[in-house]
Image: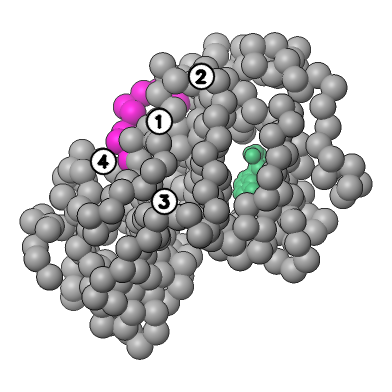
Amino acid sequence: MSNVVKEPRTVVRKFLARPQHEGVGATVRRSIGRFELKYFDPFLVLDEFSVSAPSGFPDHPHRGFETVTYMLQGAVTHEDFEGHKGTIEAGGLQWMTAGRGIVHSEMPAAQGTQKGLQLWINLSSKYKMIEPRYQEVTSKDITEAAKDGIKVRIIAGEALGIKSPIYTRTPTMYLDFTLNPGAQIQQPIPVSWNAFVYILEGEGIFGNSRSLPITAHNLLLLGGSGDGLEAWNKSSKSLRFILVGGEPLGEPVVQFGPFVMNSQEEIDQTIEDYENCTNGFEKAMHWKSESTTVFGY
Ligand code: FJE
Ligand code: FE
C-alpha cells in the first residue's frame, strides 16, 4: 500500500464504555460525554445505544448542536414537532442539525433490540441558532468503497478517494471500517482535527503495529498533529470500527442536558424559550408525538 500517512497518530487515551441507563428504559454505552471525558471538541456525546419497545427516547428538545444517528441493527422511528417523521433502518443514517430548536421522539420501530450509534457534534456560536435541517440516507445509498480486504462506509468525509455527499456544518469526517483478517489501513486525517476510534466488533491494533489489540466498546483518542491513522487486523475474525474526526471549535461550552450554548446567559434564555415556546420552540406548544401516545407515556 502506498504511504498516504507520513506521521501516524498514536493512541493517547482509551476508555471502555460501560452500559448505563438513558432515556426511558434504554441502555447506552457512553464514551464521550461521561464525566471523565465531558467534551472532545467538537464532540459532545458518543452513545452506543440499545433499545427495545416500549423503551426509548420520548419527546425531548435539542438546541445548539447536531445529532448523528447511525443504525447498526433494527430500526428507530423519529418524529418531530414540525411533522417531520421517518424510520432509520439498519445501516441507515440521520444527520440532524438541531440549530435553534427541535423537539422530537426517537423510539423503537420493530420488535427485538434496536442498536446504533448517536454522536452529538457541537455547532459554532455563529450556527447555533440556524434553522433546523435533516440529512437522511438509507443503507443502500451510503457511499461505500472496498480495497485489499478493507470495506469502508463513508458517512462523512472521504476515504479511498471517494467522498460522502453529507454536508457537515462543523467540518467532520465519519468512516465505518470493516477489515478482514490480515488487512491494514492508512487513512488521512487533517492535522489540526481531533479524532477518535470506537471499536464495534473484533479486535484491532491502532497507531503502532506493536501495540496490544483493542476490543469492542472501547474509545481511543488519537493524539494531535499526526496526518492520519494506521490500523491492523492481526486477528482471525473481522474487525469493525468507526473513525471520526472534527475541526475543533475552540469556544466555551455550557451544556444543560440537550441544550448546548456558549454561556450561562444563553442557557438561561434557552430554558426560557423552551418553557415559553419562543425563538424556535413555537411548535412545541401543543405538540405530543404519536409514539408517545402509542407507547403510553
Ligand atoms: C436523552 C437528552 C437526550 N442518547 N442515543 C437527555 F437527547 C437524550 C436522548 C439520547 C439518545 C437518543 C438516541 Cl435515538 C440514541 C441517545 C441520548 O434522546 F436520553 C437524555 N436523557
Ligand atoms: Fe434526540
**Badge number at residue 169:** 1
Among the two numbered marks 2 and 4 on one chain, the one whose residue lies closer to the N terminus: 2
Query: Which amino acid, mark 1?
Result: Arg
Among the two numbered marks 4 and 3 on one chain, the one whose residue lies closer to the N terminus: 3
Q: Quadrant of ligand 1?
A: top right
Q: Is residue 268 left or right of residue 229?
A: right
What residue is shown at x 31% (from left), y 68% (from top)? 146
Choose mark 2 or mark 4, whichever is in front: 2
Give coordinates of residue 248: x percent, y percent.
31, 34
Element assignment for label 2: loop
Q: Is residue 205 visible?
A: no
CB atoms at circles 2 and 1 under 8 Å apart? Answer: yes
From the viewer's side, name the closer residue of 147 and 42. 147
The part of the chain drawn in magenta is 245-253
Query: Which amino acid, mark 3?
Result: Ile
CB atoms at circles 4 and 1 under 8 Å apart? Answer: no
**Badge number at residue 155:** 3
List the residue tagged with mark 4. 193
**Badge number at residue 130:** 2
Element assignment for label 3: strand
User: What secondary structure do most residues of the magenta stretch adopt?
Assistant: loop
Q: How far apart are the alpha carbons under marks 4 and 3?
A: 17 Å
What residue is shown at x 31% (from left), y 83% (from top)? 181
What residue is shown at x 12% (from left), y 58% (from top)? 4
Badge 1 crowding class, 10 Å Cα cut-off, few under 14, some 14 to 19, many 20 or more, is: some
Badge 2 crowding class, 10 Å Cα cut-off, few under 14, some 14 to 19, many 20 or more, is: some
